Amino acid sequence: MSAHLGRRLRKGATSGAVVAAAVAALAASQAPEMTPPPTDNAGGDRAIGAGDTAPPSGDDSATGNSPYYTELPPLNPPNNPGLPPVKLPVITGPAQAGIPASVLAAYQRAEQSIRSTAPGCNLPWQLLAGIGKVESGQASGGRVDANGTTLTRILGPALNGVGFANISDTDHGAYDGDSTHDRAVGPMQFIPSTWATWGQDANSDGKKDPNNIYDAAQAAGLYLCANDRNLALKADLDRAILSYNRSTEYLNTVLSWFEYYRRGTHQVPDGTGVLPVDRSDDRGQDNRPLPTSPLSPAPKPSETGAPKPGPSKPGGPSEVTKPPTKPTPPVKPPVTPPTKPPVPPTVPPAVKVARLAVVSSGPLTATTESAFTKAPTVAALDAAGAPITGVSIRFEITGTTDTRFPGGATTATVTTGSAGIAAAPTLRAGEKTGSFTVKATVVGRGMDATAFTATVTERQADALARVGGDPLSATTGTTFGQSVQVKATEKGALAPGVLVTVVIADATGTKESADGPSFEDGVRTLVLKADGNGLISLPAILAGDKAAEYVLRLTAPGGGATEIKLTVTAPTATPSPTPEPSSSGTGSPEASPSPSA
């Protein structure tokens, strides 16, 4: 008797007052605003709206008002400890509450994602389950592969205006294989034109596939949340469901399953979900015959020719043989102007950001006139801690140093990548030492800045050494003729840019000399910078007027030091020349004798 009653309820309840009673019973524990609206007692699958007398065009709904499963849930739903039990006769077993594992995961993932990006929508995953049940029987009982893609395509009938909406092909058959008319596609039954607007890649495989339960569930959730709907409000909930399929019966059927799943459900293996029966195209509208929908296999006559139900195959739709009906000429529905699909809610990435998390670790330090080896890096995260792509992050340098971004800029804007991470451009220190701050903020969002402290220190060298050359010596009053070059290194590597202090000291090397050698203008202390090869070239050194030993002392930050000996000598004395002999006087040579007379 109970089974007989169940068949009667499922077969006829969606067309009359029984639906109202069943839905009201399932919704009895809700708040007053969640009571389902009155059903359309005319028995047809009519759109909601004042003065509607004909079916809608279908292109203003997600499915094109394609057929759906009208079977209602058991009148005794599973009890949820959070809601009071409903004592009604048991019609079917608890298997109806089972949802295939991948399908359930897709619904719950979609809810979590959308609640983090559009919390005001208040999307419950049970609503997606209710729609998935009536649209495809939870992806044909969970017949999906490991990635969530249906093993075979789930297609609605051609929307050719014969019993359904008239929607010409919009995808060149890419999704539905029909290049003449559109068909609803996939476990959530999107028509191609709607999928073109709302399609998602929720499983991050690089494709927006309406046949994938993760992609389809995410798209359905966003579609239901369109136009800033708050699904916690009865009016917005009704509007959302009717935007999917503009039918009072559809609304009541989805609400029935929604309430059923809210009272409890459980996971079952993929491919073992209970397949629904009784579809909205089992009976014509205004007594018109409807074509067989590809959502269910074609009916098979028995060997004796008598109609009977075909066997149900696990993981696939049930085969139901329909009794023969007398065909009547098709009636073409009135043509109504097409309407544009709802505008999807545009949520700027910046609005989704709940916080900026610091990614780079360790101190940000560099020596003067060198590049920082690390960059300030942040991750843009939503309220659930998930990364957000496409967020503009502004980095700004504040402080007294002359550190800059490339091009001498003090600000830079970077967009977060797929991992939600943005790294500032390379910082380069100037000549000034000290600390400064880099602030990271979300462009277009009033949030506290995330600050990084950075420090610029002097370049260092732990070793200084003279490069070749003879000993340095000169006489007083002259210039040392030898050039002096010193190489600076840090841990064996050249230390370009290091500042080296050069002092001409006395013989002890402890203090600057008060006399003796000097640089130009009597300067005896200089600070010189190493060139790009770590070399310091000293200017000419004047010997001075005092002969003595001196020391040329060089030191650098980091401990590098060297001393070079300077020797100043007095000039060598020049000997006096020998005088020439006189031509007369006592010292003159003897005169040669005179010749004899």
Image: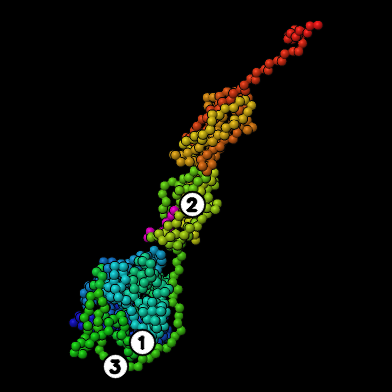
Three-letter code for the amino acid on which mark 2 is drawn: Thr
The residue singled out by tag 2 in the image is 426
Q: Is residue 59 left or right of residue 551?
A: left
Q: Quadrant of the C terminus?
A: top right
Q: CA distance from mark 1 to mark 2?
A: 65 Å
The residue singled out by tag 3 in the image is 326
The residue at 28%/75% (across/down) is 140
The residue singled out by tag 1 in the image is 163
Q: From the viewer's perspective, is residue 558 above or below residue 146?
A: above
Q: Is residue 561 left or right of residue 589?
A: left
Q: Earlier in the sequence, mark 3 or mark 2?
A: 3
Q: Position of residue 71 (x, y in %)?
A: 28, 79
Three-letter code for the amino acid on which mark 3 is drawn: Lys
State the residue in front, 37 or 370.
370
Find numbered disc 2 in the image and state the secondary structure of the residue it sits on.
loop
Can the viewer see residue 206? Answer: yes
Q: Position of residue 306 (x, y in %)?
A: 20, 89
Three-letter code for the amino acid on which mark 1 is drawn: Gly
State the residue in front, 506 or 390.
506
Q: Quadrant of the N terminus?
A: bottom left
